[in-house]
Structure formats: C-alpha cells, structure tokens
Image (cartoon, rainbow, N blue to C red):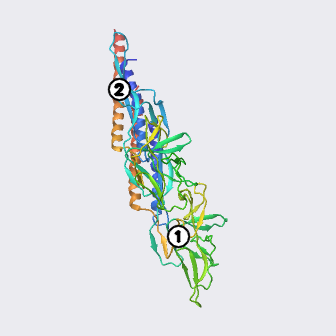
C-alpha cells in the first residue's frame, strides 16, 4: 500500500513548510531579515507500463503507459531577495543599505562574513563593529575625540571635531555584491558566509555597479510580510490535513482487506 | 476461483493503484508547476470457455495528466517566471533537455539562470542564459525577452512538445517526440504557477475509491459465502 508512504511524504513536506513559515514569523522584527520560501518537487515515477506500449484507438487520445508517482520532497528553501522597509532611527551609526549588497565583517576566526544589518556600534578601541562585536572589514576606527560622525550615501565616513568646522575623512564603507545572493549560507545572527554557489564576493563602492546606497540614521526592517505568511500557514495546515485524510482512507482500505477471511 | 472473485480482484488491484495516484496528487498540492494525474481504467473481455458468456473485467489501462494551468501566485521574485497559457520552459539536465512549468530560477555562480537543482534554463536560441554581473534590475517581458539595465540580453525559450509527454521527477517532462519553439507564449515575471491539483476533486475521488474498494470487498465476501453454502449443501446430500 504505497499511498500510506506517499501521504506521509506529503505530510512531511507540509511540515517543512510550516517550519519555514514559523521561522519567518518569528523573525518578523529581525533587522534586515529576508523571508525564506520552501519549494517542493515530485519524486520519481514508478513505471507500470512504459509509455508507448499501448496505442489509442482512432479518435481517442489516451496517453499510453502507466506511471504512478511516489510522493513529494522539499527541493529548495530559498531566500527571497526583497528590500525591507527602511526605518528611521536617527542613530548616528545606523546604516541601511538601500538596494543590493552586504556589509563585510571579519569574524574572530579571520573569516569573512556578510550582513545587511547595519546597526553599528563603537568598540572600546573605537572600531566600527556590529551588535555582536564583529568589526567591519573596512577597518574604520573612530578617533576618541570625534564629536560627530557622518556617513555619506557612497560610504565615506567623516569625523567632525570640536576644534574645526571641516570634517576629517576616516575611511570608506564598501559594499559586497554576489552574483547569486540566494546561494549564501546563513550563519545566524543576521550573517551569511560565501559559498561556491553564491559566486565570489565583489567589493564595490556604494551606489555603483548595481549595489545600493548607504543611508545613515536608518535601519532595514525585516522583509517578512505577515499577512502572506499567515495565508501560507493556513494553506500548509490544510494541505497537512488533506494528506492525513489519505492515510485514514488507505488504512480503512487495508482494514477492509484484513476483515476478509 | 469463481469469476466473480476474479473480476472484483482485478478491480481491487486497480483501485489500490488509483489510491496511490490520489495520494500523490494530494502530496503534491503545494508543488510548483505540478500537473495532476488521473488513472484510466479500460475494459477487457475474457471468455472463460467456448460455450460460456464472456466476462468484462476492468483494469488499469492508462494514465493521463491534466495539463490545465494552475493558479498564478505572485511572489515578486525577479527570476520567478510563469508561462501563461500553453508552453514549457526548457532545462538542460544531465539526462538531456527536459520541459517544465516550474519557473523558480536563480543565478548560478557563473551568472547563468538555473533551477533549484542546478540545471540551466535555455534561451530561445537553445543556449543557457547569462545575466551580466553588474545588472541591478532584470526585467522579463511578456514575450520572454530579458533585459538588464535597459539592454536586451536574451529571450526565455518557451516550447511546445511534439507528441506525448513523459513524466519525469522534479516536475520535469521528457518529450521523446521532440519539441518546437512556441513564439506566441506569454511569460509572467514575478509569478509562479501553483500545482493544478484541486483538493476538492481529489478528496471526492479518494472517497469514491475507498467506497468502491469496500464494495468490491463485500462482493467477494458474498461470493465466498455463496460457495461455502454450496459446499455445505452438497455435503449434506
């Protein structure tokens, strides 16, 4: 009785969908979070009668062969490349990326990581770091006596001091672009790692070659559309129930068989 | 065995397979580009002997899939495309070209358009489509033309199969009879074609299958009773 396993694969697929949706909803307030979507594909087909063996009669179009499917499996859980809404925070070191691109960070292991979460801070040494303390790969150090910091749209960081009207440039924030952003590996903590599928990191000046601009005083909200997630959740739940009905029906058919002497 | 039992046994086996078809449809009710399946039963006549009437038996004779278009779901994805009306996308798989209606594509690390399994999407010229790396906005027009930053790059190939389609895994179809370009196709960017499984129809079909199976079972039980009664009454003589 294959229908039991087929329905079980359907239930597992809907369960995966609910897992993905619940993670999206849980991250509805996460800075610069990008929603994920689970995609499915059908499993192989069992050939009871190879197509081409039976010919149809004149005038009737009966596709030849008997192929019976064996269920479903999740094929990809891909990241949706959407721009979250930009929220004004007025934070001096808050930068949002308006468009494509990532900020490059250096992990304690020396490895590079990428993020769109531009809620930056100053480390005890004056370095520009993320909320988790990982420094920007651009290595920008803010002087102790700097009164005000300005970050321009194209990434130039300028420090202003009390003794001069003229600002002093202290570095540039660059953005990194990947050919296939969906291929990045999520590390958690809003960070991603480069992979073979994503292509190599392309370091660019903000606002050039398709990367976005930087906006000081803004952060990017989560890209999760809650209404869409809830309607998907309802769909997934009903799909799960439908598959469980198949299990019940198959079970009843089997019990009809066993009732026979 | 009596012909009653034989006839219902044949039907029962067919119903079991049909249940699998229904289960597979329902399991794929969220699969992008999936086309629902239908089991077809055919009758064949068996003649038990020269002087006896022939018996008609129902067996699973064929298999058809409904190519009706599924609902469009707007995702807004740049490389999510759906074919409106007839036509298929062509993918270059290791097993040869495969047709599909599932248009969930992404860029490979070489900047070509690929599906979720890494198979390249073929353009109208039959070659993989390469998107320039510096392209910030890629637009796919209604006729499948792909443009990046205002420049035409390529065209998404949409084809029509010649002859019968054969099902393959991953919502792919093989076209043993070949395929020909379909110029009048309409392509929609930012949308995915949902599975065309109708849950209502499938559940109704499932109930029908289950009840028919039980009816067959009851029929066999009756016939079993009949034979055992016959044996008992013969023995009593």
- Of the 4 image quadrants, the one containing the C terminus of chain B is top left
x and y, in percent, of residue B14 in the image: 40, 29
| Position of A150 relative to B12 (above/below) | below
- Image position of A237 (left or right of B129): left
Instruction: Find residue B88 and report its image quarter.
Output: top left
Q: Residues within 10 Å of mark 1 (few under 14, many from 20)?
A: many
Q: Is residue A12 visible?
A: no
Q: How many marks?
A: 2
Q: Is residue B133 visible?
A: yes
Residue picked out by circle 2: A58
Q: Nearer the viewer, residue B123 or B237?
A: B123
- Of the 4 image quadrants, the one containing the N terminus of chain B is top left
- Image position of A162 (left or right of A53): right
| Position of A107 relative to B93 (above/below) | below
Q: Residues within 10 Å of mark 2 (few under 14, many from 20)?
A: few
User: Which SS class for mark 2?
Assistant: loop
x and y, in percent, of residue B7 in the image: 37, 22
| Position of B158 relative to A33 (above/below) | above
x and y, in percent, of residue A18 in the image: 45, 53
User: Which SS class for mark 1?
Assistant: loop
Q: CA distance from mark 2 to mark 1?
A: 65 Å
Output the chain of dot 1. A
Furthest-bottom residue in this view: A163
Q: Nearer the viewer, residue A230 or B4?
A: A230
Furthest-right residue in this view: A110
- The tag earlier along the polypeptide, 2 or 1, is 2
Q: Which mark is residue A219?
A: none
x and y, in percent, of residue A156 in the image: 57, 76
Instruction: Find residue B219 and report its image quarter.
Output: top left
Q: Are the residues under badges 2 and 1 in a single subunit? A: yes
Q: Residue at x 33, y 39 (%)?
A: B204
Residue picked out by circle 1: A207
């Amino acid at each position: 009785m294959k229908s039991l396993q087929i329905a079980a694969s359907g239930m597992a697929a809907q369960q995966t969908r609910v897992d993905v949706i619940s993670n999206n909803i849980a991250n509805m307030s996460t800075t610069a979070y990008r929603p994920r979507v689970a995609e499915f594909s059908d499993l192989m087909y069992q050939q009871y009668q190879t197509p081409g063996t039976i010919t149809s009669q004149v005038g009737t179009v009966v596709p030849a062969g008997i192929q019976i499917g064996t269920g479903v499996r999740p094929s990809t859980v891909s990241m949706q490349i959407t721009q979250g809404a930009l929220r004004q925070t007025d934070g001096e070191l808050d930068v949002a990326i308006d468009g494509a691109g990532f900020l490059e960070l250096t992990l304690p292991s020396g490895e590079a990581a990428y993020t769109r979460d531009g809620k930056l801070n100053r480390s005890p040494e004056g370095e520009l770091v993320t909320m988790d303390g990982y420094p920007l790969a651009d290595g920008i150090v803010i002087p102790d006596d700097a009164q005000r910091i300005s970050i321009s749209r194209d990434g130039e960081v300028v420090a202003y001091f009390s003794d001069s009207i003229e600002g002093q440039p202290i570095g540039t924030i660059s953005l990194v672009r990947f050919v296939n952003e969906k291929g990045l590996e999520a590390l958690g903590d809003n960070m991603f790692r480069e992979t073979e599928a994503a292509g190599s990191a392309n370091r660019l000046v903000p606002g050039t070659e398709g990367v976005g601009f930087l906006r000081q005083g803004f952060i990017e909200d989560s890209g999760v559309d809650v209404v869409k997630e809830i309607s998907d959740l309802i769909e997934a739940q009903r799909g799960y129930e439908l598959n469980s009905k198949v299990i019940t029906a198959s079970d009843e058919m089997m019990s009809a068989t066993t009732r026979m002497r | 065995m009596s012909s009653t039992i034989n006839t219902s046994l044949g039907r029962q086996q067919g119903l079991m397979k049909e249940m699998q078809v229904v289960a597979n449809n329902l399991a794929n009710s969220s699969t992008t580009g999936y086309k629902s399946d239908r089991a077809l039963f055919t009758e064949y006549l068996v003649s038990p002997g020269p002087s006896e009437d022939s018996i008609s038996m129902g067996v699973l004779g064929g298999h058809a899939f409904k190519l009706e278009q599924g609902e469009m779901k707007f995702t807004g994805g740049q490389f999510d495309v759906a074919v409106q009306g007839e036509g298929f996308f062509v993918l270059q798989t290791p097993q040869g070209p495969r047709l599909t209606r599932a248009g969930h594509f992404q860029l490979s690390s070489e900047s070509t358009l690929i599906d979720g399994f890494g198979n390249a999407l073929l353009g109208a010229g039959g070659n993989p489509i390469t998107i320039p790396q510096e392209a910030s906005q890629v637009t796919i027009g209604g006729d499948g033309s792909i443009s990046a930053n205002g420049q035409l790059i390529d065209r998404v190939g949409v084809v029509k199969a010649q002859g019968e389609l054969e099902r393959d895994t991953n919502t792919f179809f093989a076209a043993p009879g070949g395929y020909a370009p379909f110029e009048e196709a309409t392509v929609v960017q930012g949308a995915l074609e949902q599975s065309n499984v109708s849950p209502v129809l499938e559940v109704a079909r499932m109930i029908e299958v289950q009840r028919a199976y039980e009816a067959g079972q009851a029929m066999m039980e009756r016939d079993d009773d009949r034979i055992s009664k016959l044996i008992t009454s013969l023995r009593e003589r």
